[in-house]
Amino acid sequence: HHNIPVSFWTMMSSSLRRAWALFALLTATTSPPTTFVHAKKTSVNDATAPPEETAQPPKPTASVDDLTLQIPNVAEDSPPDNGSAALSYDPADLGQDFKHFTAFSSNHTCASDTHALPFNNQIRGVNLGGWMVLEPWITPSLFYQFLGGNETAVAMDHYSFCRVLGPEEGNKQLRRHWESWVTEDILRELKDSGAVNSLRVPVGDFMFQPYGPYVGCTDGALDYLDQLLDWAHSYGFSVLLDVHTQKDSQNGFDNSGQTMGFSWTSGLSTYPRDLTTFQHWPIRSANWMGEFDPAAINYTTIKYDNIQHSLDVIGSLLERYAGHPAVLGVEPVNEPWELTPLDLLKQFYWDAYLMVKEKAPFWKFIMHDSFRFTPETWGGFMKGCPDRALDTHIYQAWMDPASRLTFYNNACAQKKQIALMEREFGPVIVGEWSLATDNCAMWLNGFNDNLPGFPRSPCKYIPCSAPYMGTDQPGTPVDIGKPVQGPYGTGMSGPSFGLCPVDRDWMTERYNRGEGGMSWMSSPPEAPRGRDGTDEVMSMLALKKISAFSGIGHGFYFWNFRTDLYNPQWSYMLALERGWIPKGNLNDDRIVNSCHREDEGAFVCESNRDAPEDSLRAGMSYALSEEGKDPRYIYDLHGNDLYDEADTIFNEFWDSRRAQGATCDFGGVATLAETNKTHSEDYYTDDYYNVVEVNTFPFWKIIAITVAGVLVGSFVGFSLAMRFSPKFNRRVRSSAMLRPMTSSRVFRKSFGNPIELGYTGLDIDN
């Protein structure tokens, strides 16, 4: 009987809450212990409060100055539950007061949110990937130097780059890379595009808390990041700091800093001799939060030191950048893999969130979905907490080969899931997406490696690009006299005779040849001259993705801003250059209406019926004031009348401004709902199928037209000769062979009567 609803709890006064808690403690009966250990109510302005006493063994803590948060207790011999069991409310948890809200650690929720900085503007941004965290597929020029190397001389990620080259040479090459990969001119170009308002910057945990081979190798990285933030502020960009790497890897990918789950297999290769081989994808692992057992597909031990290290990184990041005006917020971990223990991950998010809200109360806190973008996983988590959002990454590059219509429909179908998560969790951001529809980009799945079975179709090859940092870079240019060099992974990808694989072309469809949209099945990777439909397909796909990601959610970041190789499907700047992504503020009707055929319904922005009336009025007042209308009348409305009026105000504002970046948020009191709104075909202007018919003719048509032309020409020539040549006329009319034709009524009427045989009164030679 002590589990009272949170909504009722938050309506109590502070003194009443304390009285209830005292009563609960005095009358409590024996109950099973909770998995988490929580702190008593304190305030960031109060003196240091000791952690709640517990009989459990001590564990590493995440200190928020005077608040001590405990990491969940998971016995090393008892793997944590990967599920998302809801925690009951603990009446002894009186909450932790922050600047704009009260946080309840017992169930990871918040109350009394004043929503001081509403999430009312959409993000339209790009990722600055491959800069502070190396990924070989983005900047292959840095990794050509390792081709042909053996087990001790090959680098495949940022960690091994620093380990193989050492701190001095590694830092020398990195500084040259930092200078040239991101420049002020690039930021100016992005600003001039008119469509970008934010930058997501992947940073390494090692930049703030160096360890292992990173020590010395990455010196100076923070100075370049400082400079970027200053540039961003001067050009009006906000910046999301994305902690892209974690100690021992959060996903096993090279983008985590260290490829995890890796084994050299050269000793097993007896023929050909001296072949250097390795294995990664079949044994991939991720050991950030603990030791992963691939046989049990679970974690057997938990690495509390690594979790504490990650929290310390957040602390260092806050200490350096909490006051910088360009910083939008932080994403504490990028892409923790889907086998990450969910209870540990949520506790880590919660601890990091409270640290951020103490030091930087206006920052956004972005959490990656761990490849589990479902209401069952995230619904209700951190409910009522301000300025948090869920990040999901939506790619089509790993889909099976398919028609353009399949990719179009898949892009637009994301609207429904995004809308569902916006309702069940809150703000959603698509933190990474691209225009790639295949897996051909060189080293996309790792240096000289590939996923088993990938790429699904033959790839296009183009001359490898010149090194972006200059010809002083070791290993460049690529040797045009050598085929694919080792070491060799489980799949094939790499430069060959100076050519590098990139994304395939799309071909135009010829439905008058019976292709019916199926030419992709037999098309070559490089479209024949006159049949290249890549511009049309990519332009339409970009419109639909932008419509899906920005029309419903809270915005997006394109991956990536540039690529070393010419691969515009992965390069925002090249896509702009090709005209695939529109310039301007993305309010073109082609974007807004681009998914109309895929949409089975539309969406409306309506009030959240669980929102307090005062918060609702704040959101309504904001919308009316932006429209130049007097909001005073809404204070006379109550109950259903107030919520019905909010439905109208919110939907009209969102519908009229969503193309300019408005979101259905209004201080957290509005949500999206699906409706069956339809339009006539004349309402739309986009070309859904985007099919170009090539007007080629079969051979039989050419023969038929030629014969018809000869016949028509002959008839015209005959008629003219009969009219204007008396000699030709007399010969025809006197011909016995042509008598069946010349004796006809039509002929006689047109050219005169036939001449009887033996008639001598006419000299036909004159």
Image (cartoon, rainbow, N blue to C red):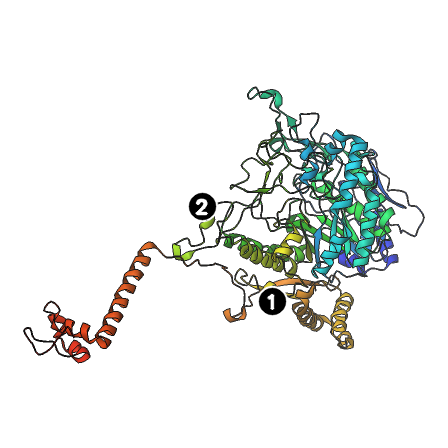
Horizontal arrangement in the rendering, residue 45 relative to residue 406 (left or right): right
> Residue 215 in the image: x percent, y percent?
82, 34
Which mark's residue is nearer the viewer, 1 or 2?
2
**Residue occupying image coordinates x 33% and y 54%:** 699
> Residue 634 in the image: x percent, y percent?
75, 74
Q: Is residue 279 above or below residue 9?
A: above
Residue 504 appears anywhere in the view: yes
Q: Secondary structure at mark 1?
A: helix
Q: Residue 166 falls in which quadrant of the image?
A: top right
Pointer 2 residue: 522
Q: Is residue 324 above or below residue 351?
A: below
Q: Is residue 500 above or below residue 576?
A: above
Residue at the front extreme? 766
Q: Residue 720 falls in which quadrant of the image?
A: bottom left
> Residue 253 in the image: x percent, y percent?
67, 37
> Residue 367 in the image: x percent, y percent?
72, 48
Disc count in the image?
A: 2
Q: Amino acid at mark 2?
A: Ser
Report the disc number at residue 589.
1
Q: Amino acid at mark 1?
A: Asp
Q: CA distance from mark 1 to mark 2?
A: 34 Å
**Residue occupying image coordinates x 72% and y 56%:** 189
Horizontal arrangement in the rendering, residue 261 relative to residue 38 (left or right): left
Q: Is residue 658 above or below residue 562?
A: below
